[in-house]
Amino acid sequence: MDEVFKALADGSRRRLLDSLNARNGQSLRELCAGLDMARQSVSKHLAVLEAAHLVTTVRRGREKLHYLNAEPVNAIAERWISRYDRERVRALADLKHVLENTAMDSNAFVYTTYIRTTPEQLWQGLTDPAFTRRYWGVELGTDWAAGSSVVWRERETETADPQQVVLESEPFRRLSYTWHTFTPEWAKANAIDDETLAKVAAERRSKVTFEIEDLGEGLVRLTVVHDGFEPGSTVREMIQHGWPALLSGLKTLLETGETLPEPQ
């Protein structure tokens, strides 16, 4: 955590985070132009932010796009927030909120976490119903071949739809599938009101991609990219709060064999 506080202590690096908060997913060229900073300076500051895991990158063709990453702030929250009165840590909560939100014109949700596991075990954690049921409460029925349908089972409800499909499947490296269909049964099981159901059901279908990178010595980097949202998407607002908690549960399960305690 020392790296996180060191990274945030510099005003130029905070400006870079502010720039990404205003418009996430920028290239190095865009960040330099928007902040009127020399390319070398921006590169050095980004290296510090990446080392602290406050910024994560995703390759799109020849460009490397930079995104805010909330995982380090979530780690701070897990370590300390439960020990203090909520009002006394409002500043940390506000920072967490900033890092988890992206601008209206860049709706992709990108989140990177580091897990003490192997690519094979992480793949199992993402695809095996026995694992997903424990930290997610969801089972995904499919053979995980590209083009195969996916049946979602959650809270005694089952959702099948021709558009729920596996998009990419490269075992132990990359997995992508379309997000589930929003049905009245799903809404009832998750206490979603009729107005919210109508909004999310009317939106175009999004997709989620998991990128797995073996860093060696029993450490794996997992990057989740959830995109395809409409501007002002209600689904986007919902998943940005769900993914950090879900991935914390996955990390805990793979590293300790235990699940996170239920919220009080």
Image: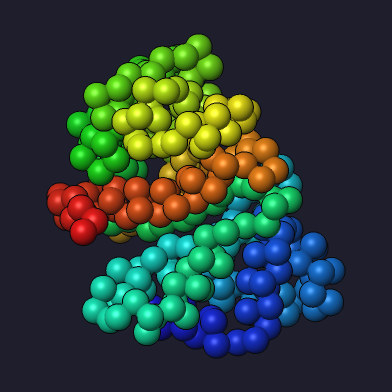
Res 236 quadrant in image: top right
Is residue 43 at least partly visible in the picture?
no
Picture quarter with the C terminus: bottom left
Residue 231 screen position, x and y as percent: 70, 43
Q: Residue 90: in sight, yes or no?
A: yes
**Side of 81 relative to 238 (left or right):** left
Based on the displayed image, in which of its 4 quarters is residue 122 positioned? top left
Q: Is residue 209 above or below residue 23?
A: above
Front-most of residues 217 and 132 = 132
Count of numbered circles on the image: 0
Furthest residue to the top?
A: 162
Q: Looking at the rendering, which quadrant does residue 131 occupy?
A: top left
Q: Residue at x 24, y 24 (%)?
A: 156
Q: Nearer the viewer, residue 246 or 254?
A: 246
Which residue corresponds to the image point at 31% horizontal and 75% vertical from the top-left? 81
* Quadrant that contains the N terminus: bottom left
Residue 164 is situated, as x and y percent measured from the top left of the image, at 48, 20
Q: How is the image coloured?
A: rainbow
Q: Residue at x 23, y 49 (%)?
A: 254
Q: Residue 174: horizontal and vertical position, in percent?
A: 47, 36
Q: Residue at x 35, y 53 (%)?
A: 245
Q: Is residue 186 above or below residue 77?
A: above
On the image, the x and y values in percent for residue 48 come to 56, 76
Q: Which of the two residues, 106 or 252, is positioned nearer the viewer here?
A: 106
130 relative to 239 in the view: left or right:
left
